Image (cartoon, rainbow, N blue to C red):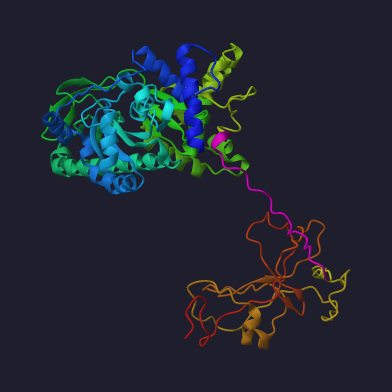
Amino acid sequence: MTDAQEYAHLMARVREAVLSGDPAPAAPREVVSASWERSLAGGVDPDGHLPPIVWSTDDLRDRRAAHPLAEVLPVLRSTLVSIADEAMHLMIVTDADGTILWREGQVDVRRLADEVGLAEGTRWSESAMGTNAMGTTLAVGRPVQIHSAEHLVRAIHAWTCAAAPVHDPDTGAVLGAIDVTGPLRTRHPATLALVTAAAQLAEGQLRLRMTARDEQLRLRNLPHLLGLRGAALLSPTGRVIAAESCGPLPERLAARPGVLALPDGREAVVERLEEGYLLRLARGSRPHGAPTLGLRFLGATHPVATVDGREQPLSPRHAEILTALALHPEGMTADQLALALHGDAGNPTTARAEMHRLRAALGERIVLTRPYRIAATVTADFLDLPTQLRTGDFTTATTAGPSSPAATPPSSATSATSWRRPPAKPSSPPPTPTTSGPTPTPPPPPPTWRSGTPSSAPFPATTPVSPKPKPVATTSTTPPRRSPARACPQSPARDSRARSTAPRPGLCTEDRPRPLCATTWVLRAKSTSVAPESSTARPVPRSRNGPLTRVPRRASDHTALPLVVVGVTRPGRNRRRCGSPRR
């Protein structure tokens, strides 16, 4: 006896116990138990119940031609029918009421399905046939798999089925269900995943077709739309496709000709087009009252703002800005926003740029400037959370956001840290090698040098050094040559003229009208506040005066150290310029 058969026998005993009111040997799944309750409350007979025939053959033909799923039927056939034939299954497509529109599969399986009324034109909703995959998935709005005695009606206990709903990408309404049904022995755990993928594929095809229709409608009416001020183009279902100088509009409006009142108080006139609607704002119509702004941030995967009934997805940074502004109704300057968002390293210019993008997304009526503040009536879940916790409404508090007894709203210093990127971890030293062998010798410490006095720590043995006098400024008599377009990163030790002249360490004070293509190298002087050397730093180049390091780009990288110039170079006439390709 297989596991599927054992589960079928167990569910048969559970079903009999539930119908008779006796204790059940096991609890059915939650989706099955809830479906049994709905079916019994709807008057479904568990014994000997057959599905009603809703559509005749002629009516069914017209129903199929007008249904939206007829456009994606070829895709479903290429995806499911071949698999269903090999696995002794049937592919079934229903409408939103549970009426079977298409049924395809092997002849033998279709003959068995006719015995239980699983045919085209019959209705298989929960109210008509009790618990089954097609009716239950339409009732709950998600993929469902029903096996054997989980069906409420005894006549279909020998069948197993999996179904998934298909939603309209335009309105979000359920268009129908895609079902794969077969005899009990054909049960497979991957059937539900297969049906779910087929439903998603169908929704994707419908979305592509909707986008193509919207583009055709936009191109056809674009010249007429650009000639009007304060007009919008609506789809046949009332969805806003394009707008011209209309300000913020909801995503969807009432699709009927006549006068229409917008949520912000403005009046508009809707006119019928051949394939949609044209909305024109009334002259002199202005918004009445303050706009409304709803923020749903707690427990949400993606933050969303609702502006006068229109949902606007937000980036994590914009959600942080709105949280900071909602916690400071008096307003915040660019410096305050930069401090709240980025800390001491914040830049007011970055905050102003983000505010410009946020105002373009939400509208200038929602966020004002000087200082930045929210001019709309704000309703936010994180603002209601402290009141819910103080009043003891823990059920609403835990369902609105993260279920944490210590949940508190973000402070002004953190400003919605739930979407903030985690701080960069400090770089740790490389792990100690675990392989056996001699321990590598660490590089020698950088030498120190004090002007006018011998070094307190000797240089490496390979570089004899004697005390040198204090460097003085020198002036080069070489006439200036053509100035390069960019600074040369070559080392001064590579210039033959620099080696031949051998300039002494010092600063060049000559007034040169053109910039030198030069690289300045400095000696690290001895100081009590020298930045610690990293163990992974690359070895620095050396000269006869000691190691050479580049001037740090920021003052915070190295503490103020005395710098001594040891070389300035200029590219010769026959030398290759920096950045130019080799010949």
Q: Position of residue 145 (x, y in %)?
A: 41, 32
Q: Nearer the viewer, residue 409 or 502?
A: 409
Query: Which residue is drawn at the image coordinates 18% and 29% (left, top)?
Result: 279
- Helix, strand or loop for the magenta stretch, by majority: loop
Q: Nearer the viewer, residue 571 or 87?
A: 87
- Number of marks in the image? 0
Query: Left of 547 or right of it: where is 135?
Result: left
Is residue 174 shown above or below 463?
above
Query: Which residue is drawn at the image coordinates 15% and 36% (left, top)?
Result: 65
Q: Is residue 127 magenta?
A: no
Query: Which residue is drawn at the image coordinates 55% and 23% (left, top)?
Result: 26
Q: Nearer the viewer, residue 501 or 221?
A: 221
Q: Nearer the viewer, residue 395 or 454?
A: 395
Name which quarter of the figure residue 377 lies in.
top left
Query: Left of 471 or right of it: where is 105?
Result: left
Q: Position of residue 79 (x, y in %)?
A: 31, 47
Query: Which residue is drawn at the image coordinates 36% and 22% (left, top)?
Result: 153
Q: Position of residue 204 (x, y in %)?
A: 31, 43
In this orientation, does residue 135 appear?
A: yes
In this orientation, does residue 331 appear?
A: no
Q: Position of residue 166 (x, y in %)?
A: 31, 34
Name which quarter of the figure residue 308 lies in.
top left
Query: Left of 208 or right of it: where is 276?
Result: left
The residues colored magenta run 417-437
Q: Is residue 434 magenta?
A: yes
